């Protein structure tokens, strides 16, 4: 693996509950640069929550908005740490944009940890099902090749605290 360039954006990808937002904030603080959370940008732009976008307009519409915002972020600008939604890699256009955007880091965690974290944290429309564990596994099986395709670096976060993960990313030479 090659380390992120000195002024390159760092882009965090990975499944829901793998710590993208938490680790992204820490990385931005360490680098002294802005942190951008794509889901938050989408909510601000749409003036509503992710859940209601899914409920009222459906996932395909959400993916279009996601790709449009990614496109805006790909314009040249100061270094940033960018955390993305877990399903961003499902669209080919978004995968291409992610690669253009900077140094892409894939954060990973085992299904049990994902299940536990997503149960405790904010709502995730895709996991509102009788059997979230099977849903997580099915989504992971489908998404893993896409995460791998765009990632410059893969990190298993289990057993690491968020600071350790952030340091690992910065030292990933
Ligand atoms: C999604 C993940 C969510 C959010 C939306 C869809 C997904 O982001 O974008 O609920 O398809 O995995 P987080 O990964 O930040 O939870």
Image: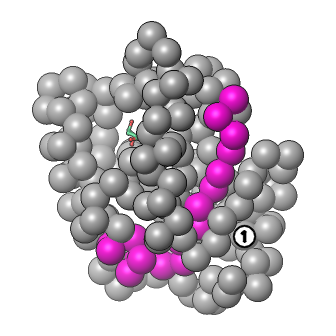
The residue singled out by tag 1 in the image is 169
Percent x, y of residue 103: 54, 77
The x, y position of residue 36, in whole percent, is 46, 59
Is residue 110 inside the magenta stretch? Answer: yes
Is 80 rendered above or below residue 121? below
Q: Is mark 1 within 8 Å of ligand 1?
A: no
Residue 169 in the image, given as x and y percentages of width and height? 72, 70
Q: Tell me which corner region of the image, top left, top right, bottom left or bottom right, holds residue 121.
A: top right
Q: What residue do we see at 44% from left, 51% from top?
A: 143
> Considering the image in quadrants, where does the C terminus appear?
bottom right
- Residue 152: quadrant of the picture: bottom right
Residue, x 79% and y 45% (percent of image)? 158
Q: Is residue 143 above or below residue 12?
A: above
Instruction: Check disc 1: other Cα within 10 Å, few if <14, some if 14-19, many if 20+.
Output: some
Q: Taking the image as drawn, is residue 80 in sight?
A: no
Q: Residue at x 38, y 29 (%)?
A: 126
Q: Residue at x 65, y 51 (%)?
A: 108
Image quarter where ligand 1 lies: top left
Q: Residue furthest top?
A: 130
Q: Quadrant of residue 81?
A: bottom right
Q: Secondary structure at mark 1?
A: helix
Residue 165 lies left or right of residue 106; in this view the side is right
- Residue 140 visible? The answer is yes
Rendered view: 110 above or below 9: above
Residue 156's place in the image compared with 82, above or below, is above
Question: Where are the magenta residues, as a range?
Answer: 96-112
Percent x, y of residue 146: 43, 61
């Amino acid at each position: 693996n090659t380390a992120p360039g000195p002024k390159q954006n760092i882009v965090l990808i990975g499944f829901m509950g793998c710590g993208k937002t938490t680790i992204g904030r820490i990385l931005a603080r360490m680098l002294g640069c802005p942190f951008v959370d794509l889901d938050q940008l989408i909510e601000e732009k749409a003036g509503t929550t992710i859940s209601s976008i899914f409920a009222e307009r459906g996932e395909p519409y959400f993916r279009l908005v996601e790709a449009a915002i990614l496109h805006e972020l790909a314009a040249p600008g100061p270094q940033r740490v960018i955390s993305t939604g877990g399903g961003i890699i499902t669209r080919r256009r978004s995968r291409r944009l992610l690669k253009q955007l900077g140094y892409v880091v894939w954060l990973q965690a085992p299904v049990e940890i994902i299940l536990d974290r997503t149960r405790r944290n904010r709502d995730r429309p895709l996991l509102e099902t009788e059997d979230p564990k099977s849903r997580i596994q099915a989504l992971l099986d489908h998404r893993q090749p896409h995460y791998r395709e765009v990632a410059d670096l893969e990190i298993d976060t289990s057993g690491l605290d968020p600071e350790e993960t952030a340091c690992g990313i910065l030292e990933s030479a």
